Amino acid sequence: MARTGGSSGRRAGVDPEVLWSRAERPRRGRPPAHDRAVITAEAVALADAEGLAAVTMRAVAGRIGAGTMSLYSYVPNKETLLELMIDQVGGDHRLPPEPSGDWRADLRRIAHEQRAIMHRHPWLPGALPAQQTLGPNTLAVWEYTLAALAPAGLDARARLETFSLLTGFVASHVLYELAQERAVEAAGRTSGELLDAQARYLKSAAAAGRLPHLADALEATGNDPAPQAVFDRLLDRMINGLTAAA
């Protein structure tokens, strides 16, 4: 995944050299009973089931049968745990060994992979703005995307920015989709019923004549409830806009 923003004002930072470049070093004594991969997997499972707020050092320690303090031998703080979680789910990308050479098709595939991962891990799009560093799985996706964008004629900096903007779009859209799913569930109605009610309200609001541009847009758009179709249409517009200056 790509970072979509900064996160200033945190109490502590994550040193990328300590986190990614040095071998995991448990304290001296008995062989370690756990490792970071297991701890991270449990934290991801907990976030998937109950949300990111449920992921505390105490809760994760309980899932692996360890004392809370012993967890700090492997992961020094929750910020570091979040970095490990983001990078672990970044390894879920299923991409071909090499880009196809059709950079638009490759970007679409990357975006579809991102969307699928974010739906499997609903906490992820909200967590990305707090990401402080890039782990090995994330770096592999960056490298693949930069190679995929090479035929677009963008310089290296523009390719980096394009991927960041694309990821930001996907994360924002998934947050919207997840919010809509929660709204449907809370209303106790099907998504089609809720969309129909929304369409009737908007059309009645536009019918008074004070919103002619909105009325035209609603007439042209109609009721398009298929999330995949909406995502694909917006994605194509996003990709064309991102690379318009190429």
Image (tube, grey):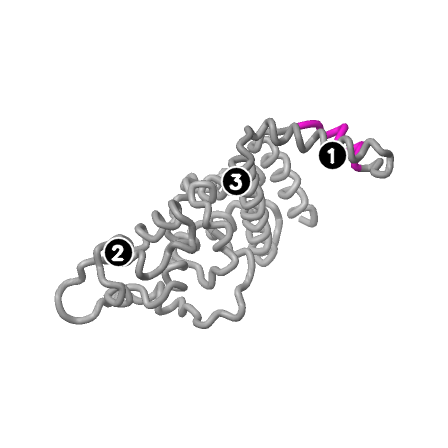
- Residue at image mark 2: 62
Q: Secondary structure at mark 3?
A: helix
Q: Residue at x 27, y 64 (%)?
A: 68
The reply to whether callout 1 and callout 2 are in contact (CB within 8 Å) is: no
Q: Residue at x 48, y 69 (%)?
A: 10
- Residue at image mark 3: 182
User: Image height check: is 132 above or below 108?
Assistant: below
Q: Marks 3/2: CA distance?
A: 29 Å
- Reply yes or no: does residue 219 show up in magenta: yes
Three-letter amino acid code of the residue under disc 3: Arg
Q: Position of residue 145 (x, y in %)?
A: 50, 48
Between 94 and 53, the one lying in front of the other is 53
Between 243 and 93, the one lying in front of the other is 93
- Judge whether residue 98 can be spotted in this image: yes
Between 113 and 211, the one lying in front of the other is 211
Q: Secondary structure at mark 1?
A: helix
Where residue 40 sits, quadrant-wise, is: bottom left
- Residue at image mark 1: 202
Q: Marks 1/2: CA distance?
A: 49 Å
